[in-house]
Amino acid sequence: MSLLVKGARVISPGDNLDKEIDILIKKGVIEKIAKGIKAPKAKIINAKGKVAVPGLIDMHTHLREPGREDKESLYTGSLAAVAGGFTAVACMANTNPPLDSEQDMEYIYTEAKKIGLVDILPIAAVTKNMEQKELTEAAKLKKAGAVALSEDGHPILNSSFMRHALEYANMYGLIIICHCEDKALSAGGVMNEGYMSSLLGLKGIPAEAEAIIVSRDINLARRTSGRIHIAHVSCKESVALIRQAKKEGVKITAETCPHYFSLSDEELKEYDANFKVNPPLRAKEDIAAIKEALADNTIDIIVSDHAPHLESEKELEFDRAPFGMTGLETSLGVSYGLVEEKVLSLGELVNKMSVRPAGIFGLDKGSLKEGDAADITVIDLSTSWVVKKENFKSKGGNSAFIGKELKARATEVIFSGRLVMENGKVL
Ligand code: DOR
Ligand code: ZN
């Protein structure tokens, strides 16, 4: 069936497009973008007063399959992704067992296709079984569709090993997504080290635990000419290092997550483990630095780091609860706060949630022009909604935003030319 998105303000920064215009979709692709399209047989999506953007892309999610389907599965993760307005998500390799082989890549692609709600793009481990003893086979993984390599969840602490990984990944055009954490400095820590950790009597993780490894990875990327992408940037020290490295021409890009620019370590005063993430929520001045870095493109993209955990685990005492919060269903709403605060324009936000992720990782996505596969997100900017756990599609209820009022919400999602969400309901 063909679809006609009518009357939306279409914002596609990669195509220099920002105007009220119609989009006709036929057989999975954008057939026509023009004013006043008439297509009597098409299903009409009345998007007057809304915006339509290239399908949002989340390059950092934990979908937990295989191994922890009690926390999330490719299916429930796909539902959550659509509900959040995404048409593509990249899933991290720290599953059980880890995604480290061609068969694992095939498994993800096959299952995602069967589910048919979003593209799920596998990120492969850097090392076999994530044991950091032997490198995975980058050439084969790339061929099987790995979009990047990462040991996210764990840093690669052996610098020589990291150097070889970069050299090897670079030969096959793969980016390494770096989880930067000096484990000796972060050991035993459960929140940001600073005034709040002293006040609460919780062991802190200093910003330097992140920045020292960011600095090392920048040095190794410079040495090897390898491409690095810094995961979940949380502190001002990392921002300064990345900004400088970019000036020098190091092949580096970076991401942050909605919680790092909207929540500070002061949130931890209730000892609610839903605010426990790794890296930890930092101080107010870090939030300011992250926003500045988003505005000047030191930080290229926004990702959710969607990390579902069981309620029973998050209810453990703070020290013992696992790190991580869900994010697929709140990422857009929280990130829209940046537009309201005038940190980013709406077009810049679309850049960071669709255009740039596609560009950095070489995906044929993030644009809206005739002939493109039709991945489109329609967003209502005038709505406001309260985040409720019972409305989540994700199996994880461990969100720091429950009870918060957010603006902006995806109401329609078109994936590969099919309507997969309509009026805010996943079909
Ligand atoms: O908070 C986090 N949760 N940080 C990570 O690096 C890993 C993730 C997870 O897998 O739960
Ligand atoms: Zn992660």
Image: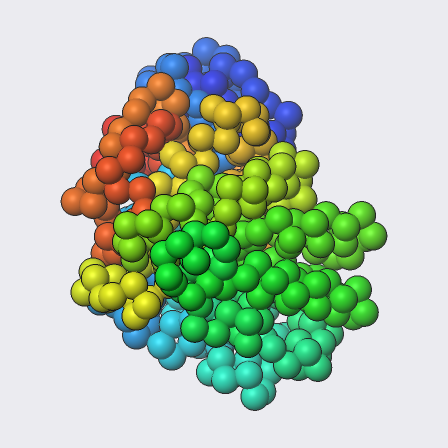
Q: Is residue 417 left or right of residue 208?
A: left
x and y percentages locating residue 258 in the rendered image: 45, 43
Given residues 175 and 189, the one toward you in this image is 189
- Above or below, 279 relative to 364: below
- Which quadrant of the figure has residue 164? bottom right
Q: Is residue 295 left or right of residue 338?
A: right
Q: Residue at x 56, y 20 (%)?
A: 18
x and y percentages locating residue 210 in the rendered image: 58, 62
- Above or below, 250 relative to 98: above
Given residues 124 and 230, the one toward you in this image is 230
Q: Can I make out residue 339 in this image?
A: yes
Query: Is the C terminus in the top left, top right, bottom left or bottom right quadrant?
Result: top left
x and y percentages locating residue 175 in the rendered image: 64, 63
Q: Which residue is drawn at 70% across and 68% down?
A: 216
Q: Which colour scheme is used?
A: rainbow
Q: Residue at x 46, y 83 (%)?
A: 129
Q: Can I make out residue 4 in this image?
A: no
